[in-house]
Image: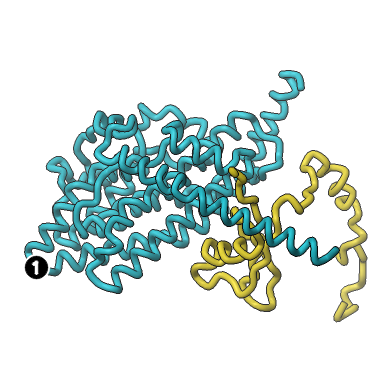
Amino acid sequence: MSEEQIRSLERQFEARIARDEKIEPKDWMPEKYRQTHIRQMSQHAHSEIVGMLPEANWITRAPSLRRKVALLAKVQDEAGHGLYLYSAAETLGISREEMYEQLHTGKAKYSSIFNYPTLTWADMGAIGWLVDGAAIINQVPLCNTSFGPYARAMVRVCKEESFHQRQGYEIMLKLCNGTPEQKDMAQDALNRWWWPSLMMLGPTDEASVHTEQSMKWKLKRKTNDELRQQFIDQTVPQADILGLTIPDPDLKWNEERGSYDFGVINWDEFWQVVKGHGPMNKERMKARVNAWEGGEWVRDAAMAFAEKQRERREKQVV
Amino acid sequence: MKKNWPLWEIFVRSKNGLEHRHFGSLHAADAEMALENARDVYTRRNEGVSIWVVESKHITASNPEHNGELFEPAQDKVYRHPTFYDLPDEVKHM
């Protein structure tokens, strides 16, 4: 194809997206669109899969059966969300094994928030409330993104996600209405998860390199800073109901803007964690690689069994 | 051995009276495992009463580049629609 032809195809392509038409896997698409989507969807999938680890840490120690079944269901949902997203990414021609390979070698990133440790039961509350809360804000606009398989996966993810946030908030509520020690535990969890949750919504607009292109392709509907403001504005009143204090001395209602002003985010910490120097980066990768390598004989055995069954059936036919 | 589990397409009937609809795909060693995995991945909240699985390689898909010759001929056949036919208003139940 000549460059002129490609430019013309690209113009038609951008026009389709501008008209809110969906792009399906076999449609012509610019190489950059394909690569960007493979990157974003696979990293989204990795985040769901790695995101199971901090919570799995507390399943066996959940304080009641009610909490345990809820946490199990939540972690199982995250596995499901990872699978929806991996298979959506596979429609663009990357294999599941390649994606795992990229995760395990550190070539692909996942959400930095999962590189923080879960020290107490209250962290299960804080994660559901704040981390899933921030994730929902990030994900809801993706239900209308331009790539069909991604949008469809996100519709399912978003439907399931709201239970996650509510179960987390309920844990916080229970702790806050409990003994002083329990309330302290909830406050401590909020103190540790608040800032990483704000960072989860991505670098500031000035530092974000992909925003403009992502807006055009509807991978983004609002900028990181807009989403962060939305998250803060909706979360502060929820903290008030719990009777907890947001660990930000500069947090203040701004009557004029109709929003909360907030303090400076420690972006050095964010980039350190992104680059692999967070408290749990190495643990998380080790757990994933172990699961993959330790499960190899199971995958092989299942395949061998399936082949044997097939051969047996074929012989019977003869 | 290093043989990867093949990809399967999953179709779910959400309730009797409705058709099976494509829900997504997943990897499994064989059809039975694909059914079991589909139950866990796609019907955790009563989304279905029946599941079909088919190995993705058995699906033949039309090529979007041929959409013109495949689908456009239908566009100028307005006489296939009831509104093409002019009838007086007095005619009822038609």
Could you tell whether A211 is left or right of B1 in the image?
left
- Residue A312 lies in quadrant: bottom right
Could you tell whether A25 is left or right of B73 in the image?
left
Could you tell whether A96 is left or right of A249 in the image?
right
Image position, residue A220 (x, y; %): 48, 40
Q: Residue at x 33, y 57 (%)?
A: A56
* Above or below, A82 relative to A207: below
Mark 1 nearby-residue class (10 Å; few <14, some 14–19, many ≥20): few
* Above or below, A242 relative to A117: below
Q: Residue at x 60, y 46 (%)?
A: B4
Three-letter amino acid code at disc 1? Thr
Q: Label 1 is found on which chain of the structure?
A: A
Q: Residue furthest top?
A: A3
In the picture of the structure, the residue carrying the numbered disc 1 is: A179
Image position, residue A270 (x, y; %): 28, 34
- Chain A tint as drawn: cyan
Could you tell whether A126 is left or right of B35 in the image?
left
Identify which residue, A105 or A290, lies in the foreground: A290
Image position, residue A90 (x, y; %): 60, 44
In the image, which lettered chain appears yellow? Answer: B
Identify the secondary structure beneath mark 1. loop
